[in-house]
Image (cartoon, coloured by chain):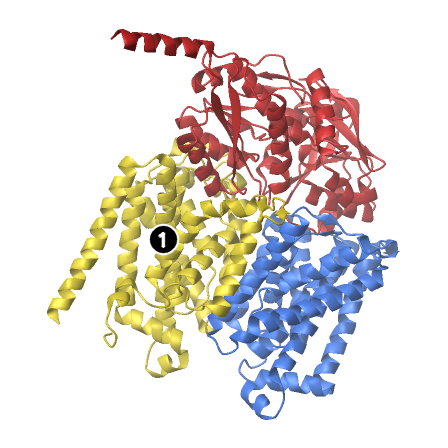
Amino acid sequence: MRKLATLITSAALLASVGIAKEIKVGAVMPMSGPLAAYGQVTYEGVEFANTLQPTLKNGDTIKLVLVDNKGDKVETATSTTRLISSDKVVAILGALTSTNTAQTIAIADKKKIPVIAAVATNDKLTTKRTFANRVCFTDSFQGEVVANYALKDLGLKTAVVIVDQAQVYSLGLAKAFTKAFKKGGGKIVKKIKVTSGDKDFKAVVSQIKSVNPDFMFLPLYHPEASMIARQAKQVGLNKPMFSGDGVANQTFIDLGGESVEGYMFTDFFDYSAPPTQRSKDFIAGYFKKTGKKEMNSFTALGADTYNVLIAAMNRCANPEDSVCINKQIKSTKGYEGVSGILNIDKAGNATRSAVIKVITNGKAVYKTTVNP
Amino acid sequence: MDFTVFMQQMVNGFSLGSMYALIAIGYTMVYGVLRLINFAHGDIMMVGAFLGYFGVSILGLPFPAAVLLAVVGSAALGMLTDKIAYRPLRSAPKISLLITAIGISFFLENAFNVFFGGTPRAFPVPEYMEIILSLGGLTFSVASLMVPIVTLILLAIILWILFKTKYGMAIRALAFDVNTVNLMGIDANRIIMIVFGIGSALAAVGGIFWAVNYPSVEPMMGVLIGLKAFAAAVVGGIGSVAGAVIGGFIIGFTEVVVVAFLPEYGGYKDAFAFVLLILVLLFKPTGILGLNFDKSRF
Amino acid sequence: MNLIIKKEQWINLAIVASTLWFMWFAQTHFDEYTVRILNNIAIFTILAVSYNLINGVTGQFSLEPNGFVAIGAYVAALLLLDGDAKEYQYDIEDPYPWVLLLHANFVWALFFAGTFSAILALILSFPVFRVRGDYLAIVTLGFGFIIRIIAINNPEVTNGSLGLNDIPEYSNLYWTGGIATLAVIGILNIIYSKYGRAMKAIRDDEDAAIAMGVNTFKVKTLAFCTSAFLEGVGGGLLAALLTSISPDLFTFFFTFQLLIIIVLGGLGSTTGAIIGTILVIGGSEWMRFLDEPMNFGFMETPAMPGMRMVVFSVILIFVMLFAREGIMGKRELKDLFKKRGES
């Protein structure tokens, strides 16, 4: 009996001194398939944030478990279930797009495992869910930023909106912009529907030319946006063009060539204007490690999903208590992340700044930061 | 909708239709001699566009040389797929041939995806192709003007080969009856290979035109274009080269006209080719040129 | 003679009983990850055996599964979600009033999912089977694309590219496994019926079949509609397993996976389709290593995302060229135990 008691006390003692445990954190990302390019840059951020900060303040180490969902829904469901039931992760980072992230959240929410999304901006993602969080802004916010900037700073009053019917991102952003632009006194003179994969926009640009708006809002991804910009120039349509973060990459500039000069878009972050000290350190380390000269904003957001999670875990008495982690993520206040200063509200949505960039001489140049 | 706008859309449709036509010719010829829907044909067009891209931006070739590289490379690839994948299956059930064709198609798409990445690449278009011409309110680029002209020239050459040369006669004979052709001492396999070569070369031209007009190349670009081109071949009358060109123009015009004049149906643009295909199968399975299915071809 | 049939029936019964017992055991004892993979296998078994009926047994090359699975999934999802749940999630356009009124329990939802697919298959049969089977492949391939285009462009019904979410999670191994068992029994009964013999006759020699008085149009249509029905049901089960569906789920890759399954298992063999499903769906988790960096000892390859797809297509071409019979050929399980000469 006494032996047992000693054993128990010594075990308790050991536990309190803390034998560094290994805690697993899951990541669901498309590392292959059509979305692979985006999944890879995002995970790069998660991974590098993990090498910078591999342990919690109590000494426990964090082990990342990455599962590739190939950008597919069935695979996302399988991956998420695997992470929760077989790897026993305390939280999940991912899964890039809004539709796949919704799938991950649907499963994780039932198991009370918090999810932090890096770049899923759809408004409805976090509603009615307890364990859904994100570090990016929502479509509504981004739409408002563009609407206000166009109305107040540029004095543009009429707009044509081109929406990609096949992309959740495009639909959400177009809707948010339309609402904010009308509210601010602007007028949408035409809304045109296109579908991802379209290449021929000659009919579209001819229509825009005939209604002659002050500017065009194109909440699209880079392949379609660049084709529209090119074909617009061909018919002599030289109105300002504005997009969301869907065109925030070098490929867009390569595809658009000279026709995207002066093109404006919103982004989460710009590596040439690091907003915090953590950001400066991260970028310097990242350049050193990879030998690259540029950093995608998805990398910064990926890093922040990890950073916010670690900060939340550090605030919990038991860093393996998923419910506590979730609560702490939702009380993130003024966190100085890689991508900027983050606040996460009770609903799990981040309040954060956006930056506006303009393409000048074949480079995306930082123009201004918009705070919420 | 005034006359200029209408004419402008006609010009656009003509250019788009020509590209479908160039690819449809390959489908129709292969179907003619083998009764095979060559699913990989659209992907051979993609390879052609990629070869053009590599030629200009990596090897630094002048544009015409890159086109030549694409044409020769695609023709070789077309003949190679025939030799490796289709020839061993000549006597197998047709379903094996079709499954192999799908396999080749998927292989090309994914191999390019793995080795060259899935994100679109900007195609280096020579500047003289992008010059914008204006004519009485109509605007079009040199490239979009060149497409229909080159298509018609190539059509003339193909028809000349088919009807004025010995090889053409062999191809037409093969479409009639494979066994008799073999009995006549003609190497049917060689003729089939030539057909694959011609079809793939035209697909490469179509692919380059596509890449010049919409300056990007990506591994999946051939899928939808290939499907529409096949529909074009059926609409025009499968087995007929002239029919394939007519079918290509019909589908090109339909797409442009619907987007321009009925923008609310613009989202269904990609579905028209199939609706036309089904209508043709229902009411006139032999297509527009009305060739009897089991008799004459080309 | 009588004795043999009886023995066979006992064996069949034993197989069914042990399958059902395994489903129960797995559902109650295995962890959720394993159960989810088993669910996937059960649903893909339904799809593979029905896809095999048109491709392998009847010999008509078709590329339809993604289209009919999509139809089934959407019909089931619209029926399973109640009015409030739908009203809440339609974000692009307001739903049509009749969309909100649709509601049914799981059994009816699956039944309508299948029926709706079968009716569409019937409509497609007319243009396609009039001109031999040549165009079936391209029409069904196009059909898959059109279904996606319709789903994207009719947000009043389908909620567009946002898809339908929060579908009640009815699917479990009892449902998926039970229906898979029923599907296999049903398909085998068709194959051994007079229709099944007519289907095989069409596959082996269509002209001879016509000469023997087989109504090829009717038989092909029957095979196609049966496939479509089961694929619709499979789609419904999938929707109730995933709890959310969207147009991007039903791409051509879905069909390609099934094609690999039936080719690998042996075109024309239902047993082969089941083996193929277990190998491909179960094995796809294992195939993950192909995308990762590899060390061959003498050289290291970098990570090549998507390599798996390349391997899949190479396997498909390879099987067609060198091992056209696949694993099972056209044989079924019981053929393996038969003595030579018996048929």
| Chain depicted in blue | B
Image chain in red: A
Give the residue number, with chain letter if any, for mark 1.
Answer: C45
Find the residue positioned furthest to the bottom: B184
For disc 1, the chain is C
User: Quick one: A139 or C84, which is closer to the camera?
Assistant: A139
- Inspect this view and state whether residue C102 appears: no
Chain identifier of the yellow chain: C
Residue C242 image position (x, y, % from top left):
41, 39
Q: Nearer the viewer, residue C165 or C184?
A: C184
Instruction: Examine the image and state in which quarter residue C186 appears.
Output: bottom left
Question: Could you say which is closer to the camera, residue C242 or residue A288?
Answer: A288
Please tell me whether residue A282 is drawn above or below residue C262 in the rendered image. Answer: above
Task: From the viewer's perspective, tell me whether residue B111 is left or right of residue A286.
Answer: left
Occupied quadrant, residue A1: top left
Q: Is residue A141 left or right of residue B5?
A: left
Q: Position of residue A219 (x, y in %)?
A: 67, 36
Numbered disc 1: secondary structure: helix
